Amino acid sequence: PGPRVPVVAIASGKGGVGKTSMAVNLAIALSASGCRTSLLDADLGLANADVLCGLVPTRRLELVVEDADRPGHSADDPLFDDPPATRAMADIAVRAPGGFLLVPGSVGVAQMTRLTDRQRRCLIDGLCSIESRSDLILIDTSAGLGPDVISFVHAADTTIVVATPEPTSIADAYALMKVAITQARDLGRPEPRLTLVVNQARKRTEARKVHARLATVCDRFLDTSLPMLGWVRHD
């Protein structure tokens, strides 16, 4: 069981397409419209949504995940410090400019780049602790198609795939969608609901061409539809 409020993941195959900028600005826009919005920065290891918000958090996402690799030590052993206590996601959340609730991700923590399946489940379950303060939860995932990204895509009610008109971005966006859909089918799970946002398009026709290209290959090779949620003009 996950949160009872809608969860929307924001993902991209290629890095540098504006995924985090879109996540932060979408959270601000939703908050301005009266929707209580929370944003989980799930770019594990290289989180930077807090940088875009001008924040310097003192508690980050690694405190939510129990370190399964840490050996147990006695509290009386003077050679070792006690590990920090695992906290609920709501305990590390901070109020960001624009009014939304930000759960800061981890930066430079090697353990967060190699989570176990149980630890990934811990993060997803942790969303329940912020649902009472949220009408909608956004998840800013890492770029690429690693197991952490796919786990959040499968856990979300909807995933916004961000792509630009650049050919490598289009190819990587399709690769992400292919892996997410085929893994769900192989495991007998419901297929993720995917939508597309074209970022950095110079005009509407360019954005529509990107969508048409991706929608065509999704229909032909994955037997699935890809609706276009919108596009953002290059600025």
Image (tube, helix red, strand yellow):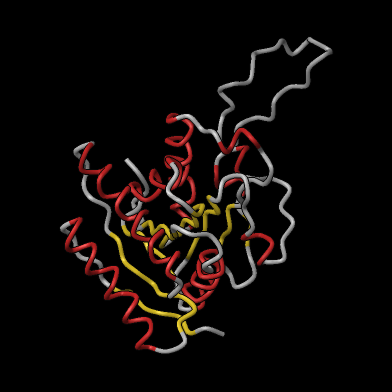
Q: Position of residue 96 (x, y in %)?
A: 63, 65
Horizontally, residue 2 falls left or right of residue 132, namely left
Q: Quadrant of the N terminus?
A: top left
Q: Nearer the viewer, residue 174 or 103?
A: 174
Q: Position of residue 52 (x, y in %)?
A: 66, 66
Instruction: From this view, report whether residue 85 is shown above or below residue 216.
Output: above
Q: Quadrant of the C terminus?
A: bottom right
Q: Nearer the viewer, residue 175 or 139?
A: 175
Q: Residue 147's quadrant in the figure?
A: top left
Q: Residue 67's quadrant in the figure?
A: top right
Q: Position of residue 69 (x, y in %)?
A: 59, 21
Horizontally, residue 86 falls left or right of residue 197, namely right
Q: Position of residue 211 (x, y in %)?
A: 31, 74
Q: Residue furthest right?
A: 78
Which residue is drawn at the image coordinates 52% and 54% (left, top)? 40
Instruction: From this view, report whether residue 7 is shown above or below residue 108.
Output: below
Horizontally, residue 169 falls left or right of residue 96, namely left
Which residue is drawn at the image coordinates 26% and 71% (left, top)? 227
Which residue is drawn at the image coordinates 48% and 64% (left, top)? 37
